[in-house]
Image (spheres, rainbow, N blue to C red):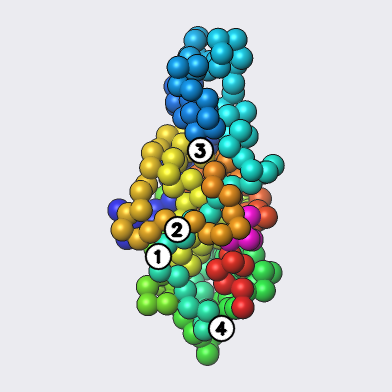
Amino acid sequence: MFKKAAVLVVSCGAVLSGCGTDDPRIENEQTVSNLVEAGFPASDIRIFEDAVYVGNDALVSLQASQEMLQPGEGSQEHYRTTNVVSKSLTKICINPTSTFNSYARLSEGLNLAIANYNALGLCFTMVRGPSTGCSATITATTMPGVSGSSGFPSGGRPYGTISIGTGLNSYSADMNEYVITHELGHAFGLRHSDFYYQAVSCNTGGNEGTAGIGAIHIPGTPTTATYGGSIMNACPRNPETGEFTSTDIIALTSLYKC
């Protein structure tokens, strides 16, 4: 399943129409799970009229239960695959196909995504190709729909293709930036921040597991996910900015800063 990492908009169900956990049953299940993880005895938690209570009279929202797990405000975890990209690579070329270039918003989103990575001062520089002297090449191609897909590193090199749905051309430049930045994150070995429970960012979803490619915690990032907390969440918010969060930056610089 995770030879290629199909992600984002498609996994939100009805595209971008608020990818939060708005089903009360799903929210309640996650709230109870968070409370147990935070140390509350299961016997002290109950669900009554689509709400979760602790101690019979203290109503706890999903957001409140998530905050109980947070070491600090606005924090979230990051995980990587077993294989990562070699720091010896210095110039990584992103080569869009002619079809990709024919979609103005996809093309703009690619420029913005490349700028996101180059702003971090990592070991490598991304260049929009065609170009010469490339240490590795990633082809940016298209696929039907409004999702994106990519894969994970192998042999010290990033995955060689990202595919972006042509339907995203009708969305904002920021959403295209988000999807492309996200897919490039997979190509460089980042797992979904909420891989252990996709319902954190999507309407539904469970645990992706290690999937044979690893889910290794990146030092310096906490160990719980929040809705909208990372560009590597399984589903985006609507709207999205397309920019890295502070812990996205920690994760990438931890892996790829020389």
Query: Which residue bears the numbered disc 3?
Result: 200
Disc 3, SS: helix
Q: Residue furthest bottom?
A: 133
Callout 1–callout 3 Cβ contact below 8 Å: no
> Magenta stretch?
247-251
Q: Is residue 224 above or below residue 25?
A: below
Label 1 sits on what residue type? Thr
In front: mark 4 or mark 1? 1
Query: Which residue bears the numbered disc 2?
Result: 216
Label 3 sits on what residue type? Val
Callout 3–callout 2 Cβ contact below 8 Å: no
Label 2 sits on what residue type? Ile
**Foreground of the two, 115 or 192:** 192
Query: Which residue bears the numbered disc 1?
Result: 82
Mark 4 vs mark 1: which is more N-terminal?
Answer: 1
Residues at marks 1 and 3, CA–CA distance in whole angstroms: 24 Å
Is residue 178 at least partly visible in the picture? yes
Residues at marks 4 and 3, CA–CA distance in whole angstroms: 35 Å
Q: Residues within 10 Å of mark 2 (few under 14, many from 20)?
A: some
Residues at marks 3 and 2, CA–CA distance in whole angstroms: 19 Å
Residue 241 on image: x %, y %: 66, 50
Disc 1, SS: loop
Q: Residue at x 59, y 21 (%)?
A: 60
Residues at marks 2 and 1, CA–CA distance in whole angstroms: 7 Å
Is residue 167 at least partly visible in the picture? no
Q: Is residue 218 left or right of residue 118?
A: left
Q: Residues within 10 Å of mark 1 (few under 14, many from 20)?
A: some
Query: Which residue bears the numbered disc 4?
Result: 90
Mark 4 vs mark 3: which is more N-terminal?
Answer: 4
Q: Residue at x 62, y 67 (%)?
A: 253
**Quadrant that contains the C terminus:** bottom right
Callout 2–callout 1 Cβ contact below 8 Å: yes
